[in-house]
Amino acid sequence: MRTATNKQRGFDQRSGSILVLIAVLLPVLLGLAAFAIDIGYISLTRSRLQGAADSAALAAAEELPNGEAALAKAKLIGGFNLNNTDGIVANEDVEFGTWNEDSEFFTTSAVADADAVRVTARRSSANNNSLSLFLGVFSGMSETDVSATSIALISKRAGIGTRFLIDDEMIDKDITSIENLANAIGRDAEELVTARGFNDGKNYGDSDWSWEDNFLDIPAGAQLTLPTGQGTDYDNNDAGLFDIDNPDFPFTSAEDFRDFVMYSESGGDSSKWGTDKSSILNQLDPLRGVAPITDDSIYSTFVDPDFVHISPIFESDVSTLDMNGSTPQVNAKGQRRGLLAFKIIAVGNNPGGSDLPYLILEIVDPSTTTINDLSPTSGSGSATGNSARTVQ
């Protein structure tokens, strides 16, 4: 019995030691488990936040240069991408700036100059949505801040389309850069602003009349610094650049739009370079949904060296008419010189006073386009609008 009792006592002592060891190690084991579980949860949340930041940045960049719309879209899309959690993207989490492709560096800027958006999606105490941890009581940390940042860059898609009507305030034989070009290449300035078919002795409709003959006889690759007129409001202006980006613009079908762009009044063979349809003529005075561009703050949004504009060029003023309710309208019956294919590559200086800025255009070879390319463009100045890609 003595032996049995000693064995039992030894067993009890070992059991007690194990229980003490377990009691000592249990908090450590639970802490390790908490650490492993919470680290995984933090990692998963950060991954989801990265997806939310990417989506929010892409959505915001597509709204540039409208800062308010970009901010609203970033906040909305950020929340959608993380189970509609409030406060994932706050106002201060959306930054506008420029992206340097070579240095891969983001620099904050005014939204008007921005080509990129940096968005931070976060679960934080500052946003009142910090991440609660599962076993934080064992790790000594009940909640934590987690964030992810993404930068999206505008990628303006290359394309071809029409957004602008241009009159003689902007393109005429006495415009300085056109005179200088004519002198440099030994041509007459009047020839440069005339449909090239006439300079070649052709008449519209002849068997040898080509698409390119409808365009002004300005050499491809030439860069012109052109005035855009004067005036800073709708009623008091002498603008040279007119915008057709309006829902009331009447020529919505592909056929009608091409007929409008190619319209040329009869006026005798010497002045007629394109089609002449009474159905088009009847809508040119008033031509609804066309407005003079008198806000110089938006000129930078027209710059896109990858987009080709094809615009009709008027030999006389496009005259601004009184607004029809909320719809702008003009008289666009004036004689046209022809078409111009160009890229807008920069905004020049404001020449002073109430004058609007210069635009710097690069002339495009019309043979690289066709009439089938013609379509009205969107508000961004390109037929497809902004696209965006994440860069960091």
Image (cartoon, grey):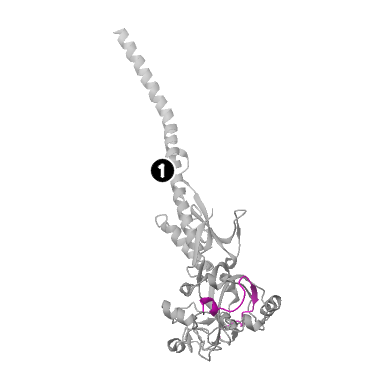
Q: Give the range drawn in magenta.
A: 209-234
Counting from the top left corner in percent of width and height, residue 344 is at: 59, 71
Question: Is 354 placed above or below 48 here?
Answer: below
Q: In this view, does 141 lie to the left or right of 107?
A: left
Identify which residue, 252 or 209, lies in the foreground: 209
User: Disc 1 designates what residue?
Assistant: 134
Q: Residue furthest front?
A: 207
Left or right of 358, for residue 122: left
- Whether the magenta-drawn stretch holds residue 230 is answered as yes
Q: In this view, does 174 lie to the left or right of 17?
A: right
**Nearer-the-camera pick, 210 or 302:** 210
What is the total number of numbered labels drawn onto the structure image? 1
Residue 272 in percent (x, y) is at 53, 87
Image coords of residue 75 (percent x, y):
47, 61
- Residue 354 rendering spot, x and y as whole percentages: 65, 82
In the rendered image, residue 216 lying in the magenta stretch gets the answer yes
Identify the amino acid type marked 1: Phe
Give the quadrant of residue 217. Answer: bottom right
